[in-house]
């Protein structure tokens, strides 16, 4: 539908922008703390909050501090936390067995959050990279990232997360067939209420660099992830992946990275009308923080503006390291 606009001066569009209350009345999109999923890094030890140099303002927390972080997030109105483990290099192996250890960092952190703040939703990541000696999301055989054997391992990883009590499982690995395999394994194991938020359209992006520092995968990674993550030049392929994952049993889908891929968010929401999330990734966070710290950008302003852009593009929510800061800016 094309908006009707009478000729000037019958129409003066600035009338609608004259005062704050008029602007508020005609605002089309809203951002609230309920739109956020907060990604949090966990590590071993006690009483540790360790800064991540390439993500100023973000820390790795020891498991004993994660409950308080969850209570703080809940008090700010943030509905979900997403856990990422910084696994001790000595626990990284070729067979990635730490990924389904019931007492691994991710599972211990899940239980700690459930004990401290039972109402906040816990999301975990399904992919082998934090546990893999070579930094890849899947098993590597003769230099090739193999699909089907990886999916079997992802199922074990997801079941151990479900046992620990997670609400949402986020497969970020981009293997084929994993959503169907995870969904049927969860059903058979009595975890039929666990949600799958598929990283369906995940691009092979340079914007993940600081995250790989945060989980200690940067040094380990050999080669790149282009044989499983998407080519940044493609958009139809994103729709095929999203449709496939929804048909296999994904409850929600994600586009990642965020800001450089808002066109994909818009197409995804318009095509499938499914719960659609974007991940404002570590590199996006680092760029905005670096420029703000240099006084080149007004940090408070660009945090909220960048997050509003996702809502405007059709997203239902955003994974963002800014979640607590943004919630505070919104008066939460
Ligand atoms: C890996 C994973 C990545 C991120 C989330 N899960 C990195 C990658 O694919 O290399 C990136 C998140 C970010 O950059 O903030 N399974």
Image: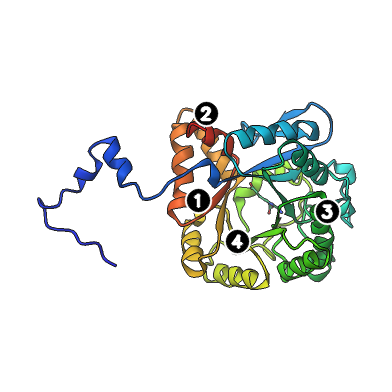
Q: Is residue 261 above or below residue 42?
A: below
Q: CA distance from mark 4 to mark 3?
A: 23 Å
- Give the spatial CA distance, label 2 vs label 1: 20 Å
C-alpha separation, residue under disc 4 versus residue under disc 2: 33 Å
* Disc 4 target residue: 253
Residue name at image x 53 percent, y 36 percent: 327
Is residue 85 visible in the rendered image? The answer is yes
Q: Nearer the viewer, residue 185 or 226?
A: 185
| Residue in view at x 52 percent, y 36 percent | 326
Left or right for 168, reference 302: right
Q: Nearer the viewer, mark 3 or mark 2?
A: 3
Residue 69, position in %: x, y? 69, 33
Identify the mark nearer the N-term, 4 or 3: 3
Q: Quadrant of residue 5?
A: bottom left
Relative to residue 112, is residue 244 depicted above or below?
below
Percent position (x, y) of residue 134? 81, 53
Q: Are marks 4 and 3 in contact (CB under 8 Å)?
A: no
Name the residue that disc number 3 marks: 163
> Would residue 139 be seen by someone viewing this image from the given angle?
no
User: Do tag 1 and tag 3 residues touch (Cβ < 8 Å)?
Assistant: no
Distance between the alpha carbons at the discs numbered 4 and 1: 16 Å
Residue positioned 64% across, 73% down in the render: 247
> Is there a contact, CB below 8 Å, between mark 2 and mark 1?
no
Ranked by sequence position, the earlier of labels 2 and 1 is 1
Residue on which the image places disc 2? 293
Image disc number at residue 259: 1
First along the sequence among labels 3 and 2: 3
Which sits earlier in the primary sequence, circle 1 or circle 3? 3
Do callouts 3 and 2 mark residues in contact (Cβ within 8 Å)? Answer: no
C-alpha separation, residue under disc 1 versus residue under disc 3:
34 Å
């Amino acid at each position: 539908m094309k908006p009707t606009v009478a000729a000037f001066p019958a129409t003066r569009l600035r009338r609608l922008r004259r005062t704050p209350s008029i602007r508020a009345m005609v605002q089309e999109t809203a951002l609230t703390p309920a739109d956020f999923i907060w990604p949090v890094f966990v590590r071993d030890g006690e009483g540790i909050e360790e800064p991540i140099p390439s993500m100023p303002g973000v820390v790795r927390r020891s498991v004993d501090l994660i409950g308080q972080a969850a209570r703080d997030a809940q008090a700010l109105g943030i509905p979900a936390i997403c856990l990422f483990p910084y696994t001790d290099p000595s626990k990284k192996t070729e067979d990635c067995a730490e990924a389904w250890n019931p007492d691994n960092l991710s599972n211990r952190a899940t239980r700690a959050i459930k004990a401290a703040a039972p109402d906040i939703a816990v999301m975990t990541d399904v992919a082998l990279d934090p546990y893999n000696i070579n930094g890849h999301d899947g098993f590597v055989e003769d230099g090739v990232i193999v699909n089907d054997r990886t999916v079997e391992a992802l199922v074990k990883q997801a079941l151990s997360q479900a046992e620990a009590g997670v609400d949402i499982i986020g497969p970020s690995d981009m293997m084929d067939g994993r959503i169907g395999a995870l969904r049927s394994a969860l059903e058979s194991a009595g975890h039929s209420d666990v949600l799958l938020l598929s990283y369906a359209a995940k691009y092979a992006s340079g914007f993940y660099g600081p995250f790989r520092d945060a989980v200690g995968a940067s040094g380990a990674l050999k080669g790149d992830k282009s044989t499983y993550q998407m080519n940044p030049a493609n958009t139809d392929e994103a729709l095929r992946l999203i449709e496939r994952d929804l048909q296999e049993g994904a409850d929600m889908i994600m586009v990642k990275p965020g800001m450089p891929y808002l066109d994909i968010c818009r197409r995804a929401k318009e095509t499938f009308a499914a719960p659609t999330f974007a991940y404002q990734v570590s590199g996006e966070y680092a760029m905005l923080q670096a420029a703000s710290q240099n006084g080149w950008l007004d940090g408070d302003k660009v945090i909220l503006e960048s997050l509003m852009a996702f809502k405007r593009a059709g997203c239902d929510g955003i994974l963002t390291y800014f979640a607590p800061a943004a919630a505070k800016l919104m008066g939460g």
